[in-house]
Image: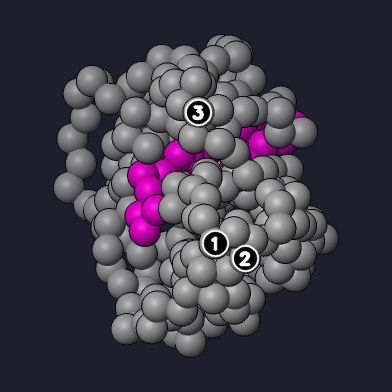
Amino acid sequence: MHPAAEHSPLGKSSEYIATYTPSLLFPIPRAAKWAELGVGADTLPWQGVDYWNCFELSWLLPSGKPVVAIGEFAIPADSPNIIESKSFKLYLNSLNQTVFASVQALQACLEKDLSAAAGKPVGVRVRTLSEVEGEGVAALPGVCIDDLDVSISQYEHPQPELLRCDTGRQVEETLHSHLLKSNCPVTGQPDWGSVTVHYRGPVLDPASLLAYLISFRQHADFHEQCVERIYLDLKRLLNPETLTVYARYVRRGGLDINPYRSTEAVSLGNSRLVRQ
């Protein structure tokens, strides 16, 4: 478990606070997990963002009438802190009985509080239901590897030794899987996700990638750190010209978390998948 997470609201009974309380946000420093992965804030081998989507965003107009919307939050991947997910949910709940004069006032408040917690500017979009509904459901790009025949019996820890590549062949391709699962390091509850790998380099054996992703099944870590571990293991194996790894997780508590890590500037969209 991340040492800071022991003091977070995760796994504890929490009072429902329905009026604005920014102190509910609980930042967790990324540095300890980066050190575990062998990287540091000054030597991060990726660019990226963590997209969070909130499907339970609500507040009051000056008239007392409630509004519902969908919030999109973009937290830089090099921010000093992640925001613990239950604290994020409790903070958003505290807006439910809070009056904002306009959407712009709400957005400014969210940007201020979330940026302070993350330690870097956080992008915020407050979106109408019709806007998101009009976008529909997206499909992941590239080839799905989930029907490949693999055998695996170890699920407690990621097994990068399962990964294989052919250094004699160079390709640029995109592979994806919906079989990513890990567990919350505090509560032990399952986190379900879909992961995409795009790279240019030695050809990766797709069956070995699938077996490796399945080995996360009982691994305990936060979403962001699972994606960073996958990125680093592939980077060490392939030494690719370019590499992008991103995962889109199923929402819990009205929030989904979608970490993107890449050698390139991230320009991917934030379209939801069928399980989101």
Task: Report the side of 218 relative to 221 (left or right).
Answer: left
SS type, badge 1: loop
Q: Nearer the viewer, residue 87 or 185?
A: 87
Q: Residue furthest front?
A: 63
Three-letter residue code for mark 1: Gly
Q: Residue at x 55, y 28 (%)?
A: 131
Q: Residue furthest right?
A: 42
Measured as percent of width and height from the top left, residue 177 is found at 36, 29
SS type, badge 3: helix
Q: Nearer the viewer, residue 127 or 219?
A: 127
Measured as percent of width and height from the top left, residue 163 is found at 42, 36
The answer to whether any part of residue 33 appears in the image is: no
Q: Residue at x 59, y 74 (%)?
A: 20
- In three-dimensional space, the C-alpha distance between marks 2 and 1, rounded to whole angstroms, equals 7 Å
Q: Which comes sooner in the sequence, label 2 or label 1?
A: 1
Location of mark 3 (residue): 130
Closer to viewer: mark 1 or mark 3: 1
Three-letter residue code for mark 3: Ser
Q: Which mark is residue 231?
A: none
Location of mark 2 (residue): 99
Location of mark 1 (residue): 64
Q: Residue at x 72, y 63 (%)?
A: 109
The answer to whether any part of residue 183 appears in the image is: yes
Task: Report the side of 105 relative to 35 (left or right).
Answer: right
